[in-house]
Structure formats: structure tokens, C-alpha cells
Amino acid sequence: MFSAFLNFIVFKTDRLSNDDTKFKGSDGHGIVLDTSWDPKKHVRCYGEVVSIPQHLSHVFISQKHRGLPSYESYSPFEYKYISDISPDIQVGDRIYFHFNTLVDKNLIKYQFEEGKKVYYFKVRYDQVICAVRDGQIIPTSSYTLVEPDMETWQDIQIPTYSNLIGPDGNKKLKPKDQWLVTKAAPESKYLLGYVRHVGNPLKGTTCDFVAGDRIIYRRQANWTNKIEGKDYFAILQKHIIGKFVDGVPVPVGTNVFIIPEEQDAVTPGGIHKVKLDIVQRGSVLHPGSSKFQIGDWVELGEADRQPIKHEGKNFISVDSSSIWGVHRFAKTA
């Protein structure tokens, strides 16, 4: 029996990887460098919980900039802690965790049980993606499991035409199997997916989407995990920036959608300007839950911008805290 580790879960597994390395060559000797090995796919990423912490402590796990300029009497960052995680995991659950968990520093011990070698590891609570209990998937640590929005074959095909002229005087389309294919196979659409499983949000935050919603997430947030035999993106709720309502993209959380200002390349006097990479101002396309209004002309701080493109319209997502000025009158030249 294990004593509780502060902030750590103890779990057991009988394997360290999902695949075995096979030696090449007739004699079966020597070392083989397998360039296809990917720890995100091949390392064992689940185990059975044998011990949970009695409580979660005030250990820092993330920070968010409050915007610029910051208040003098406050930290420029807002922090979240392990104690802000909802304690949803129970002994006996199957848990899925970060792929770098099965390393020596987390190994507690190993022993033989019923003739099989069993390893006991620890994993910090915030490194667990989800628990599975009685067949139900329960995301933890504010994770959301998202199914990729996949392209169709039609999305990656470009119609091609023959030299034959039809009755309308235009060239005839070639059969679909002769159309130009731009990719080897359909891929997941950029920044888009469908919510399938939602966990409890961190304390002090809210979750504005539910299972079934089509969402927009931040770039590089789509970390793929195979959970219960199915591939999901494991995305923290803070990295989901919008959802579709009746086909229209709407910001969630503290995000605001902005149409960026078009930057003139030449001044009225004919001098060529250096185009700024960082958008400094724009008009509000959708304010989300913020205090701003559609059409407001706003000044932006230095927080990160997420470019989004939908139905030919280009806009950006910014956090409302990075908007430091607003003009509620028509923009003049």
C-alpha cells in the first residue's frame, strides 16, 4: 500500500511502451536505430491509479499576462496553481497522462505480480489528461478532448478540364478520378475541431463550450493522444478561443475577435513605410463576453495575436486584457 504523495498520483503499468523493437538481420544481433520511434505514439501513456494525494497544494502551474501597461500595485501576471484543479481522479481509475511520464525520476519501484513485471510510477496531478471510470472518459486539469475537423477528398481536389468543348462553349470537366489532388490524403483542418469530452474548469474560470460544439483553438495546441483506442486532440480550455454558433465564429472566455487595421505601405507624402508585423489597432468583429461593442476601434497592447481565416474573412483573436484603448466614433483618414 502506498502513502499519498503531495500533488502526485501513483499508478501501475505492466509495460513501458506500446510496441516492441524488432531486430533486423538474419542473426538477430546488433543495435537497430528506429527512426520511426515517436514517444508521443509508442510510449505507454496510461495506467491504473493505486494512490491519490490527500489534497492539492499551492504550486504554480501556469501564468497569464494581465495586459500592458500593468497596474503598479499588482503583478503583471495572473497565476494558476495545482490547487485550482478539480480533484476528479479516484483509486482504480485508468488515467492517461503526458508522454514523458515514464522516466526514471518518476519510477517508484517495480515488482513481479502473478509472474508479470509491474512498474509503479508517480505523475503530478496537472500532467494527467483524463480518467476513465466505468467506460466514461473524464478530462482533468481543465483539458478538453477534441476530435479533428477533417477535410474531405473533395476539399483537396482541384477540378481539371479537357480540351473537349461542351454545348455551352466551355471546356468539359474531366472525370473526378483525373482531378488534381493537392495532398496524399485529407488532413485535419487548421485550428478547427469538435468537442467530444469536457472536464471541469480551473477554479476562478468558466467554460463556454459543451460537447458537440465546433471550436477554434490556438496554433500548436493540438497535441494528439490515443485514448481508449481513438485519436483526440488534448487541448487546455484556455487554448480554445472560439466556437461556432449557427455557423458564425464567436469568441469564448476572455477573447475578442478583431479585424486588423490595414497598414498603408506609402505615406501621403510618398514615403515607403516599414510594415509592422504586430497589429496595433483594429475594429471589433465580435466582443464575446467583454465590455466592448461591435465596431469599436481599439488600441492593442503587446499580447499574442492568433490569426484566423473563415469564409474568406481574415481577423485575429486577442485577449480583452490586451486592449488598452477604445474609440467609439468613425475612423478618420
Image: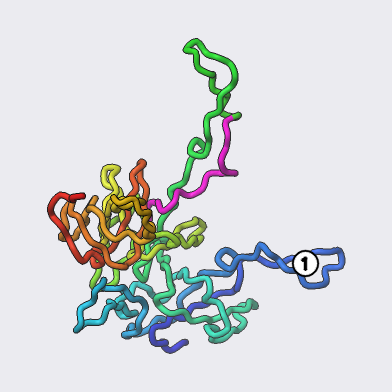
Residue 214, given in percent of the width and then of the height, sits at 34, 50
- The one nearer the camera, 257 or 91, is 257
Render colour scheme: rainbow
Q: Determine which residue is flagged by label 1.
A: 23
Q: Is residue 100 left or right of residue 37?
A: left
Q: Residue furthest left?
A: 329
Q: Secondary structure at mark 1?
A: loop
Regarding residue 217, the answer to whether it shows in the image is no
Residue 146 drawn above or below residue 48: above
Q: Is residue 28 left or right of residue 78?
A: right
Residue 13 drawn above or below residue 263: below
Q: Amino acid at mark 1?
A: Phe
Q: Is residue 331 left or right of residue 84?
A: left
Q: Residue at x 17, y 54 (%)?
A: 296
- The one nearer the camera, 134 or 262, is 262
Q: Residue at x 35, y 82 (%)?
A: 60
- Report crowding for label 1: few under 14, some 14 to 19, many 20 or more residues within 10 A (C-alpha): some
Regarding residue 328, the answer to whether it shows in the image is yes
Q: Residue at x 15, y 49 (%)?
A: 330
The image quarter containing residue 172 is top right
Residue 225, given in percent of the width and then of the height, sits at 49, 62
- The one nearer the camera, 330 or 239, is 330
Q: Residue furthest bottom?
A: 3
Q: Which stretch is magenta?
A: 179-196
Residue 69 drawn above or below residue 278: below
Residue 200 drawn in magenta = no
Q: Residue furthest top?
A: 167
Q: Residue furthest front?
A: 269
Q: Residue at x 31, y 68 (%)?
A: 302
Residue 193 drawn in magenta = yes
Residue 267, given in percent of the width and then of the height, sits at 31, 52
Main SS category, magenta section: strand
